[in-house]
Image (cartoon, rainbow, N blue to C red):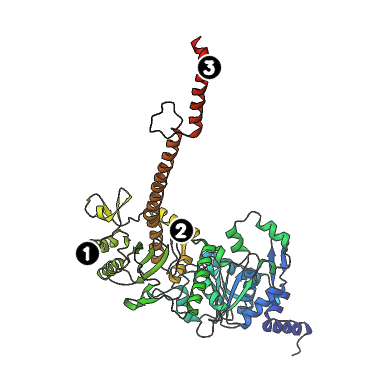
Amino acid sequence: MKISSKTQKIRSEQLKCAKDPIYFINNYVRISHPTRGLIPFKLFDFQEEMVKSFQQDRFNLVLKSRQLGLSTVTAAYILWFILFRRSKNVIVIATKQATAQLMLNKVQQMYRDLPEEMKIVKAVTNNTKQLSLENDSKLQALATSSETARGEAISLLVLDEAAHIEGLEDNSESGATGIWAAIYPALSTGGSCIAISTPSGAAGWFYDHCIDAEKEENDFKLTKLMWHQHPDRDEAWYKKETRNMTRKQIAQELLCSFNASGATVVDPDDIMEYEAYLNSYRDARKKVKNSEPLAKTFIERKLWVWREPEEGHRYLLAADVARGDAADYSAFGIFDADTQEQVAEYQGKITYDVYANLLNEIGIKYNNALVVVENNNIGWTVLDLLIKMKYPNLYYTKNGEYVPAARGRYDATCVAGWNNNSATRPMLIAKLEECCRKKLFLLRSDRLVSEFRTFVWKNNGRADALKGRNDDLVVSFALACLVYETVFEINKAKISETKALLSGIRKNSTIFDSAMKPVTTVGPSLNRNSNYDNKIKEQKENHSKYSWIYKG
């Protein structure tokens, strides 16, 4: 049977499309333009490069500016993938079902608008959650869940706006399982992954994998697409677009900046400054062949010491007590109140009695440091043990005001510890932000600075750690910032005021003495000045010279 030239041409075109997704997209895929209607999808050069990466590299990370058409490019690639490949299972995951469905809708629309000769297989299922074809290939749109696609073999996983997906983390130390940990085994048979996103702060799965990809420490290929990659954009476009945008919006939507795009409580620039300082400090210590920190001691070497106590120095120890669950830590930081330097830090999982003993011993070692502990529930357990141990310098308050331990321990109206509640927590967080902005303390701990990156403003307005991360060191540091200002800084200010007052009194007394010298009532002991004596002498001479006038 002779095949017509038309049929041969169609088959030739189908074969070309099956071999080359770029050829398929440029020649047969059409998209809906907001003003021009249905138009052919002609790829820009950078979009073609992305399609090549999707085809050649098993794991892709795309850090992108907005409105570069990457979602549309990805949808076109997915259509090619399921149309010309048998038994492929593609799953799109986003933070919400509606977001994941947008990608599915794009693929469905592209399939619908293909020329009939390119619909080489028919759709079997075509609804709001799935597109299945006769060749046993399918596309599913799913919302995030640790149970998402568990047990399925995945040919291609697409993580849409990956930086904004909560719960997308690896197995944590506590054993909590995130979405990636649940899905990754499903890719073990050779499946590939495309993770696309604008940045959303310097923390989370997408950030971590991008950083590791830059260092070539994972299997992902990282592509960064800035706003100017689009051939239709120039400086005039950029200025117009950013005119009414905030710094954070510009960083997130256009500049692909992790550091400036997040909602971290501590300003990203401040975090970067701390990190830069820590790196320089560490390099300096390496040059003199000293380890950093000076010592790592106690259970599992979780107690880090940078400087031993110095005679005459005052120290502040701020402690956070673990809730007791497997994901939480007890933590404290010790700070030199005279040099405003971090000198020691602990973060670990221990029982309350061992923790109280540690606080007692190290507090005494650091010149009876002022020890402040949250007195909420579990914190009170540790405080009570410290009181029974007769620790000499606990933090007390009366009606919210600091009271020295010498008075607080004997006054029943005084309360030990700091009460962190819904009314006082905002003040604590505000003091943390201010302290970091002003660089009040010289920090030594990369563990602490690392927690800054994952301590963020949540949608409910509360400052908290990202899911699966810890904030024990951050909370204890915030407590140190607050107590330092309310105890040591205020005392320093009072001492300065007293000195100034005494100095002023001495100066005023000198002025008072000199002003009294020219008074008319002059006693024999008054130390008069020479001008005054000359005037008296002159008056006496005149009286003797012109005495005949008075006698007349």
Quarter assignment of residue 528:
top left
Pick the residue in front: 316 or 268: 316
Residue 546 has which mark?
3
**Residue shown at the point (65%, 77%) measured from the top left:** 51
**Residue shown at the point (64%, 54%) measured from the top left:** 244
- Badge 3 vs badge 1, beta-carbon distance below 8 Å: no
Reply above or below: 415 against 103: above
Q: Position of residue 255 (x, y in %)?
A: 62, 65
Q: Amino acid at mark 3?
A: Tyr
Q: Secondary structure at mark 2?
A: helix
Q: Position of residue 84 (x, y in %)?
A: 63, 81
Left or right position of 72 against 163: right
Reply above or below: 45 against 440: below
Q: Position of residue 273 (x, y in %)?
A: 53, 66
Q: Secondary structure at mark 3?
A: loop
Does residue 119 appear in the picture of this structure?
A: no
Pick the residue in front: 540 or 128: 540
For disc 2, the marked residue is 435
Q: Position of residue 270 (x, y in %)?
A: 52, 63
CA gap, disc 2 and disc 1:
32 Å
Q: Amino acid at mark 1?
A: Met
For disc 1, the marked residue is 389
